[in-house]
Image: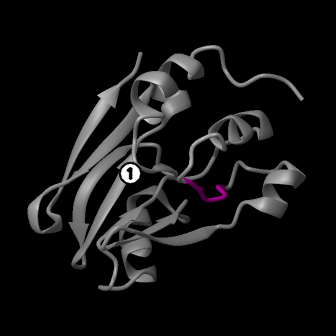
């Protein structure tokens, strides 16, 4: 087993480690990176279509639902043609979700689709993009996209 990408330690120390929860929306692609993220107390990860390693297939589910405080958060990678991913993801979850995180398109998205607040953080490894969600008064959510390199 090798090491995660050389830049990951700095990104983790600055943005990911301090977060209350760390959600990865699939295409983590390596057991090394997945294992590195496992150090976070609240690491939530879903399997993407590029996660072929047998260990990832065995241990990472395609859909997760978690309660963080009073919020219900869903996570999935997404599927299908890129222009339809957000709609398909929104339709697969329900109005009981306060936030649904997804990937697959590797494009940033902070939108409401069919009444569901969606977040796609982009691609950390491909374009150096991540998202930080802040929970405000009355569970109001805000999102900031970060370019890490």
* Residue 49 in the image: above or below residue 84: above
Whether residue 62 sits left or right of residue 117 in the image: it is: right
Whether residue 61 sits left or right of residue 10 in the image: it is: right
Whether residue 15 sits left or right of residue 115 in the image: it is: right
Tell me residue 69's x, y (percent).
Answer: 34, 68
Report helix, strand or loop for mark 1.
Answer: strand
The answer to which image quadrant residue 129 occupies is top left
Residue at screen point 55% across, 65% down:
79
Residue at screen point 49% across, 32% down:
124
Tell me residue 68's x, y (percent).
Answer: 39, 66
Label 1, on which residue? 120
* Residue 23 in the image: above or below residue 72: above
* Residue 83 in the image: above or below residue 121: below
Residue at screen point 65% across, 14% down:
6
Tell me residue 21's x, y (percent).
Answer: 44, 51
Magenta span covers which residues?
Answer: 43-48
Disc 1: CA contacts within 10 A as few (<14), some (14-19) or many (>=20) = many
Whether residue 139 sits left or right of residue 5 in the image: it is: left
Whether 119 is among the magenta residues is: no
The answer to which image quadrant residue 122 occupies is top left
Tell me residue 131's x, y (percent).
Answer: 34, 41
């Amino acid at each position: 087993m090798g090491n995660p990408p050389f830049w990951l330690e700095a990104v983790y120390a600055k943005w990911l480690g301090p977060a209350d929860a760390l959600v990865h929306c699939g295409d983590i692609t390596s057991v090394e990176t997945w294992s590195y993220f496992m150090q976070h107390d609240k690491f939530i990860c879903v399997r993407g279509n590029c996660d072929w390693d047998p260990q990832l297939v065995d241990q990472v589910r395609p859909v997760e639902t978690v309660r963080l405080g009073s919020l219900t958060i869903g996570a999935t990678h997404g599927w299908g043609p890129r222009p339809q991913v957000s709609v398909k993801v929104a339709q697969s979850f329900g109005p009981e979700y306060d936030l649904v995180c997804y990937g697959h398109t590797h494009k940033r998205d902070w939108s409401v689709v069919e009444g569901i607040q969606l977040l796609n953080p982009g691609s950390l490894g491909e374009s150096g993009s991540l998202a930080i969600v802040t929970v405000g008064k009355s569970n109001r959510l805000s999102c900031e996209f970060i370019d890490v390199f």
